[in-house]
Image (cartoon, rainbow, N blue to C red):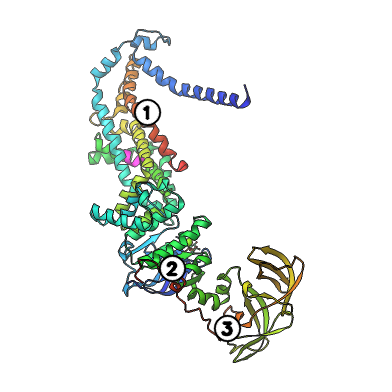
């Protein structure tokens, strides 16, 4: 074995190990979902008689589809809203920068460093007084605000990569700002916008802190659904695993389907 | 009809004044070239005319109408960018027809206009392609085609040839000149290349540090540069400058002492210059001749033989000068040579850089560009 082959072998091995470490908990969770509660807390074993009991019981206790629908509405709703706000914002920052643009961007990103729990009480009170508690609209608003810094920042970097001349040529050709955006900017940065949107959907789908604190039944998404199966007493591991499997299944499939798009978008600037 | 005037245009970016009060008249169907070193404000001035940049102060008028506050598209101008700035996601046809599409021109009419422009530029074969699948020269044509389709009153070009290789550049230069005649259009063309300026312009505007140094026909700038900067910028190889001393001034010109002690009377107006003032003599390499009894001398440092001509780089006591000599000249490096010039070829510059006015107007200064070329078939002029 020569040197470079050995190197490739090592890198390959490392990749497999890392992938396994990341994948194993998910694998174990799926497995546990098909066990009985007693088998779930018995010595870990790969050999058991699979059963759908946990799934049936989970579905009897709470309507999965209601939570799933809430998750879909909230994560896509907040993503669309975030894009609608972020595209004009990123446009002006990328193409009409002022002295304060860089600072504004950094400030926006720095808000992500604040622990969310720090603003829980004010937001809870605001939501209570405006009737947004346990509404989908409420979570859409919170998730939009939560993801906006990252969405603006990502779009800004994609837009900045677009040669200014192209938009100026459009303006010479008679395009209004809106036409410039619709006919030139959006089609040319679509891979970037798509991957930004996908990231926002995934982040919203997986968000648990706000959904647990601001919803109870009506607007609760899948993260709240999972949490509802952990209880201080009794056996719940199999049911929790079954619920978790169902909760992550859609986003896993979604992520898998859009994987190509994600990679293309995130490397968009680099390979152009 | 399209005439364009700039009146005292000033442009500031923050505290920095980039354009410092430019006045200019562009006549109908004129080919005007802005030339100057990189960073002198050519592009900025063009972008102000295009409407992509606002002037800090001053007026821009087209056919007498002030257009400062009118958007770029409504000014009726078209611009060809240095980077071509084609729309990468559209076919050549869509690129060229984009302005018409925005103006809601019906599809059939749009196609006719695009086809007409494509014919002029021999782009018919490429209409279905995307810009990525085109060569540099073809992209350039598409960018020009996109401008033609808009049927603008004035074409603006920002260094359109600088991304092409040398051979293609010469070809496009000729083609642009042909287009100018064929389209009967007013054109403003920005370049840092004085050869492009000399070969294409009716009128050259020499810019430096945001100010107009001189406006004139190519031959006017070559034979009667207004100052030392223009003299050095126009012409290649660049003009030689020698320190001389003013002796006297008559109606026949100014008598100066050359380096080495010989004297020479240059036919320029020396009114107001006092005796013993230091001046600079400007003389172009192609106007220096090797002569056994020439008033100047120096030692040859480098010889560049081009076949038809030979460039001699000669070290004089006062500095290096370039002499363009015959292709068959037999000198070798290290030889001491004597050379001279016809006094009428000399220019004298005061220490503030301004040239003393020539007493004789060169006969070619008024020549227009059309007289240099055979008439184009089918053109109206
Ligand atoms: N948007 C801008 N902001 C600040 N300075 C600028 C801007 N655009 C151009 N400049 C400055 O103005 C000067 C002239 O630029 P430009 O017109 O592009 O020169 P040229 O085209 O002659 O090379 C340069 O010094 C450049 O740095
Ligand atoms: Mg420029």
Nearer to us in this view, B207 or A234: B207
Give yes or no for residue A211 being in the magenta stretch: no
**B274 or B151, which lies in front?**
B151
Predominant SS of the magenta segment: helix
Q: Is mark 1 within 8 Å of ligand 1?
A: no
Report helix, strand or loop for mark 2. Answer: strand
Measured along the vertical axis of the image, is residue A208 above or below residue B113?
above
Dividing the picture into quadrants, the one containing residue A77 is top left
Badge 2: chain ID: B
Whether label 3 touches label 2, CB < 8 Å: no
Q: Residue at x 34, y 29 (%)?
A: A254
Dot in front, 3 or 2 = 3
Residue bounds of the magenta highlight: A142-147
Q: Quadrant of residue B368?
A: bottom left
Q: In terms of secondary structure, where does tag 3 sit?
A: loop
Q: Which residue is mark 1?
A: A256
Magenta-span inclusion, residue A144: yes
Q: Residue A82: percent from the left, percent from the top?
A: 32, 42
Q: Provide the residue designation for mark 3.
A: B356
Give coordinates of residue A144: x percent, y percent: 32, 40
Between A2 and A84, the residue placed more toward the observer is A2
Residue B348 visible in rendering: no
Q: Chain of mark 3?
A: B
Ligand 1 near label 2 (Cβ, under 8 Å)? Answer: no
Please name the residue that numbered disc 2 is placed on. B11
Q: Residue at x 32, y 65 (%)?
A: B76
Q: Is residue A36 left or right of residue B327?
A: left
Disc sitting over residue B351 in the figure: none
Label 1–label 3 contact, CB within 8 A: no
**Chain containing mark 1:** A
Q: Is residue B33 left or right of residue A125?
A: right
Q: Is residue B306 above or below residue B5?
A: above
């Amino acid at each position: 074995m020569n040197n470079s082959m050995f190197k490739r072998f090592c890198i390959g091995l490392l990749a497999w190990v890392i992938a396994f470490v990341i994948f194993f908990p998910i694998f174990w969770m799926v497995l546990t979902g098909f066990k009985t509660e007693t088998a779930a807390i018995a010595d870990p074993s790969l050999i058991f008689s699979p059963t759908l009991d946990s799934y049936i019981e989970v579905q009897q206790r709470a309507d999965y589809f209601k939570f799933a629908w809430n998750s879909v509405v909230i994560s896509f709703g907040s993503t669309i809203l975030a894009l609608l706000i972020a595209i004009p914002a990123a446009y002006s920052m990328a193409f009409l920068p002022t002295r304060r643009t860089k600072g504004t961007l950094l400030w926006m990103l720095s808000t992500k460093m604040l622990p969310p729990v720090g603003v829980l009480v004010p937001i809870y009170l605001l939501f209570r007084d405006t009737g947004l508690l346990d509404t989908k609209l409420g979570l859409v608003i919170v998730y939009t605000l939560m993801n906006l810094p990252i969405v603006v920042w990502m779009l800004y970097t994609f837009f900045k990569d677009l040669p200014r001349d192209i938009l100026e040529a459009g303006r010479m050709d008679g395009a209004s700002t809106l036409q410039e955006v619709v006919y030139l900017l959006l089609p040319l940065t679509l891979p970037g916008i798509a991957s930004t949107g996908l990231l926002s959907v995934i982040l919203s789908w997986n968000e648990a802190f706000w959904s647990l604190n601001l919803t109870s039944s009506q607007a609760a998404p899948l993260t709240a659904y999972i949490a509802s199966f952990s209880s201080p007493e009794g056996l719940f591991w199999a049911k929790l695993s079954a619920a978790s499997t169902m909760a992550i299944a859609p986003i896993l499939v979604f992520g898998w389907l859009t994987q190509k798009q994600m990679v293309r978008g995130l490397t968009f600037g680099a390979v152009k | 009809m399209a005439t364009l005037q700039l009146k005292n245009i000033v442009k500031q970016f923050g505290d920095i004044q980039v354009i410092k009060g430019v006045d200019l008249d562009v006549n109908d169907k004129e080919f005007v070239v802005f030339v100057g070193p990189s960073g002198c404000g050519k592009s900025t001035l063009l972008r102000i005319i295009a409407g992509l940049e606002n002037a800090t102060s001053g007026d821009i008028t087209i056919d007498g109408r002030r257009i400062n506050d009118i958007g770029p598209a409504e000014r009726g101008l078209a611009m060809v960018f240095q980077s071509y700035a084609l729309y990468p996601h559209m076919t050549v046809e869509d690129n060229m027809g984009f302005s018409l599409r925005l103006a809601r021109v019906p599809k059939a009419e749009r196609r006719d206009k695009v086809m007409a422009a494509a014919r002029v530029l021999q782009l018919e074969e490429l209409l279905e392609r995307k810009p990525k699948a085109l060569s540099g020269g073809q992209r350039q044509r598409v960018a020009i085609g996109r401008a033609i389709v808009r049927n603008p009153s004035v074409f603006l070009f920002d260094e359109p040839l600088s991304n092409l290789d040398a051979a293609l550049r010469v070809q496009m230069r000729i083609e642009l000149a042909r287009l100018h005649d064929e389209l009967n259009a007013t054109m403003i063309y920005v370049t840092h290349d004085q050869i492009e300026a000399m070969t294409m312009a009716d009128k050259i505007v020499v810019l430096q540090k945001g100010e107009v140094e001189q406006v004139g026909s190519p031959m006017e700038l070559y034979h009667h540069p207004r100052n030392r900067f223009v003299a050095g910028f126009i012409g290649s190889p660049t003009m030689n400058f020698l320190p001389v001393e003013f002796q006297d001034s008559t109606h026949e010109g100014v008598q100066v002492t050359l380096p080495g002690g010989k004297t020479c009377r240059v036919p320029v107006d020396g009114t107001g210059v006092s005796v013993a003032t230091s001046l600079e003599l400007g003389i172009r390499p192609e106007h220096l001749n090797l002569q056994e009894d020439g008033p100047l001398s120096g030692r040859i440092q480098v010889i560049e033989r081009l076949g038809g001509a030979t460039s001699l780089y000669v070290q004089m006591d006062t500095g290096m000068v370039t002499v363009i000599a015959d292709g068959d000249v037999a000198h070798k490096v290290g030889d001491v040579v004597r050379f001279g010039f016809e006094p009428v070829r000399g220019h004298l510059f005061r220490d503030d850089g301004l040239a003393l006015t020539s007493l004789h107007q060169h006969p070619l200064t008024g020549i227009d560009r059309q007289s240099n070329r055979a008439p184009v078939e089918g053109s109206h002029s």
